[in-house]
Amino acid sequence: MPKTTKEQLAAIKADYEYVKRTYGDVIDFTGSGMEAIQLENLLNAPSIETAVDCFKERLISLYEDGYEVSDRESKALPYFDDERLQAIGDRHLLPIPAIDIQ
């Protein structure tokens, strides 16, 4: 794990961008307003720590709920098929994703 807060931000941002670019972004079935809450947090407490927390929340959501395949449809991350997903999960203490059963 990176030592400084700036290193943590760079690492978690790169990890989030890898997941988003390779698989897709978070889908919000619940209408929880994650993006609005994260924006409010950043505006109320603009700091590197807050940005790290926002990226971690998005990664947790991706690992727990999957990524957007199409409108209102998600798919679990292929955690066991992608060693980088496993390394990202270990690095940020993320939950092991559910497995899609077809």
Image (cartoon, rainbow, N blue to C red):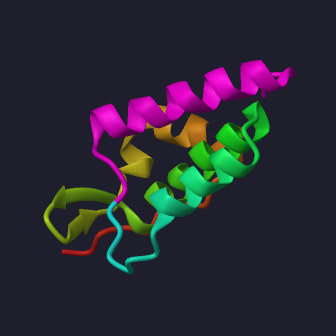
Q: Where is residue 80 in the image (x, y as percent from the top left)?
A: 43, 49
Identify the magenta region.
1-26
Say which of 90 and 28 sits in front.
28
Q: Can residue 63 be seen in this view?
A: yes
Residue drawn at x 48%, y 40% is: 85
Image location (x, y in percent) of residue 77? 36, 53
Horizontal arrangement in the rendering, residue 44 relative to residue 55 (left or right): right
Q: Nearer the viewer, residue 39 or 54?
A: 39
Residue drawn at (55%, 51%) of the image: 39
Q: What x and y, as percent, mark residue 22?
A: 29, 34
Q: Is residue 48 left or right of residue 102?
A: right
Q: Residue 12 at what x, y percent from top left?
A: 61, 32
**The C terminus lies in which quarter of the figure?**
bottom left
Above or below residue 52? Residue 18 is above
Residue 5 in which image quadrant:
top right
Residue lying farthest to the right in this orientation: 3
In the image, residue 73 above or below residue 8: below
Q: Nearer the viewer, residue 43 or 101?
A: 43
Task: Give residue 87's quadrant in the image.
Answer: top right
Q: In this view, does 10 lie to the left or right of 35?
A: right
Tell me what residue is drawn at x 19 percent, y 71 percent. 72
Q: What's the magenta bit mostly, secondary-structure-wise?
A: helix
**Residue 83, can we see it?**
no
Q: Give the position of the N terminus as an image quadrant.
A: top right
Residue furthest left as drawn: 70
Q: Which residue is at 45% across, 69% downward? A: 33
Q: Is residue 8 magenta?
A: yes
Count of marks placed on residues:
0
1 w.r.t. 29: above or below: above
The image shows residue 77, relative to residue 82, as above or below, that is: below
Most extreme residue toward the front is: 44
